[in-house]
Image (cartoon, rainbow, N blue to C red):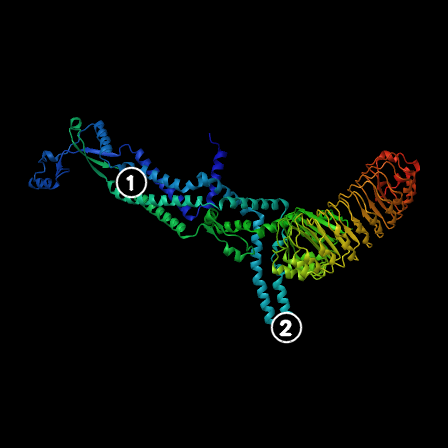
Amino acid sequence: MITLTELKCLADAQSSYHILKPWWDVFWYYITLVMLLVAVLAGALQLTQSRVLCCLPCKVEFDNRCTVPWHILKASVNTSSDPGTPLPLPLRIQNDLHRQQYSYIDAVCYEKQLHWFAKFFPYLVLLHTLIFAACSNFWLHYPSTSSRLEHFVAILHKCFDSPWTTRALSETVAEQSVRPLTLSKSKVLLSSSGCSADVDANKQSLSYPQPGLESAGIESPTSSVLDKKEGEQAKAIFEKVKRFRMHVEQKDIIYRIYLKQIIVKVILFVLIITYVPYFLSYITLEIDCSIDVQAFTGYKRYQCVYSLAEIFKVLASFYVILVILYGLTSSYSLWWMLRSSLKQYSFEALREKSKYSDIPDVKNDFAFILHLADQYDPLYSKRFSIFLSEVSENKLKQINLNNEWTVEKLKSKLVKNSQDKIELHLFMLNGLPDNVFELTEIEVLSLELIPEVKLPSTVSQLVNLRELHVYHSSLVVDHPALAFLEENLKILRLKFTEMGKIPRWVFHLKNLKELYLSGCVLPEQLSTMQMEGFQDLKNLRTLYLKSSLSRIPQVITDLLPSLQKLSLNNEGSKLVVLNNLKKMVNLKSLELISCDLERIPHSIFSLNNLHELDLKENNLKTVEEVISFQHLQNLSCLKLWHNNIAYIPAQIGALSNLEQLFLDHNNIENLPLQLFLCTKLHYLDLSYNHLTFIPEEIQYLSNLQYFAVTNNNIEMLPDGLFQCKKLQCLLLGKNSLVSLSPHVGELSNLTHLELVDNYLETLPPELEACQSLKRSCLIVEENLLNTLPLPVAERLQSCLDKC
């Protein structure tokens, strides 16, 4: 049994489709109702009549017709003036049949002599009406279209009722209303006086429409704020519209089905209008019935009267008029579908009137159902279009973002980085909250995995901003913001997920000193515009590139000759051509990391101003070219770490100015004694090699402050090591030491000592003399601390300072 609730839901579902029914569809609906009333009325009349036909026997026939020859009758009456004279027998009509015989005759004549159109007229009207009704609603319930239409209607209702739609349209109306106000104001100012002050005032009024809006007594639409729930609802509508467009826009099923049903209606109209008027003449009042029932009634011919003939004629004529109206409307709808480009819906007029100029045109079924909704009410398509605009979506995202990231929440994200700078790191957001620009103390702004970031003019409020990091994000900079960054930004770090070109705004940062680019294409793919852009970076001193290049880009060597530091991480790809390095005569620091060099490039030896050279992870097996480094008088730091170097040539001793030497993560087994002729060395890292001993000559490194031999096979330390009185950091972990010399107490400046993972059994009590050594900087097993004298252990435990 169907409940009232189910009936209500069914009625609501049917009424919701009124948005997709244009005026002719509504007109069809009412015509169909009237046709149905005609069918019901005709059927009811036919069923309620007890005797549809009334037949009488025919006793007089004249000219093969059942009739009375009235001219003979008149002649007989005139010849006989005697009123008492009886009429002739044939003229005296008597009907003396029984009631059952009349009923029998009526039934037989109804079945055999009454025309089929007169009998089945109500049923034909009912059948035609049902076909028309089915054609009108078939596309709404067809399996391939019903779900899409229902989904569209649901989304359209949500778009219509969304507060975000109202806000977007109100902003458009407000802008249109304020434009005449500002224009009229400008005319008054210009006509009243020709002085420049009036002109400036006019420009100001044209540039800032919102104050003009307030002065006109209209509330600024931007002052309204969506709450969190409304913002989330609008966001969900945007997602639904995107998915619906993706599924519907590529198909034209709805259009074709709607077109077919209209064609069926037109064909049915032609058929009805062809045969109904023709058979209308067969509905007559008098019917001559000849049946062979003389054996039962004594008569062979009967004269019948069809009692519903006149009313059926009226109803049939009225029905023909309805069909004509229905057919003309169907023909108009067919003409509309064939004439109009219904497979494309353009929002051109709306784009011109509103600020949402990015509203895209839609095609196929999406366009067709929007055309239908537009026929019902153009406001529906306007409200729907708001959720097709990326500008509108971005505005909504920004509002939701601002509501979520308040100033207090952003302040809690402020930290001090390793350079002791105040940094704000934003990760995986939908955009950049406007409240960020309220935190004027920010020095470093880091944006990571943010799809679309736009820096507005309000970035100028960050007066302390000097460093910007953009990781896997797309950053757009407004012109006022670019002017601010050009003056204040000193360090820029860009990291790209996909390979692409450097953003054009980077080359406007004329005061930029350090530029870090990762994932960018910089070789042959660089355009002429970008080459010229690098030339504008006159203050650039440090350039870091992380990409896969075959050669150092010419744009760097030719247009940045004043560059002081160049770092190139080639991510394991082989760097073939390095001759153009000779042009960079001002280079002080050079890093060629993961470039698969195998040998030290000779072009490096011409860089006379070079102070630091880093050749990390280059598969270097030999460094015989190290003798050529003696020509680099300013070279103080040499990093040959993370390679496959098996030995150090004796010529290393010629590098008398070397202060830092990184040889860790190699395959070195022995150290040449000439190494200890580099008496200026204060940093020496030999970790992760295959050393078994350290020469006694290490004592000549009187300036040594940092010495690391972690993860080797050293069994004993030379006494000369403890003659390096300036030693502050000594890393001896993961070796084969069985004891630690008591001379360790002579290292009065020692602040960091690592002894973990050795074969030590005790610690020398002379560690007490290392007054600068703290417990947190003594890396050793806990059980070895118990071997120290109690006063020494307590002193170390009481010093909790970090290294």
Q: Which residue is mark 2?
A: 195
Q: In the drawing, does residue 648 fall left or right of residue 183?
A: right
Q: Are marks 2 and 1 in contact (CB under 8 Å)?
A: no
Above or below 803: residue 461: below
- Between the residue at mark 2 and the residue at mark 1, the CA separation in whole angstroms equals 87 Å
Q: Earlier in the sequence, mark 2 or mark 1?
A: 2
Give coordinates of residue 636: x percent, y percent.
80, 54
Residue 285 x %, y %: 23, 39
In the rendered image, residue 284, in percent from the top left (x then y), is placed at: 23, 40
With respect to residue 382, does 780 lie above or below? above
Name the residue nearer the viewer: 148 or 712: 712
The quarter of the rendered structure image containing the C terminus is: top right
Amino acid, disc 2: Cys
In this rendered view, identify the residue nearer to me: 631 or 401.
Answer: 631
* Residue type (three-letter) at the residue carrying disc 1: Phe
Query: Residue 201's x, y, as percent?
Result: 64, 67
Q: Observer-nearest residue: 719 or 747? A: 719
At horizontal 40% and vertical 52% (from top left) the residue drawn is 339
What secondary structure is found at the residue carrying circle 2? loop
Which residue shows up at 41% across the image and 48% down it? 24
| Residue positioned most to the bottom | 194
Q: Which residue is mark 1?
A: 312
Left or right of 76? Residue 10 is right
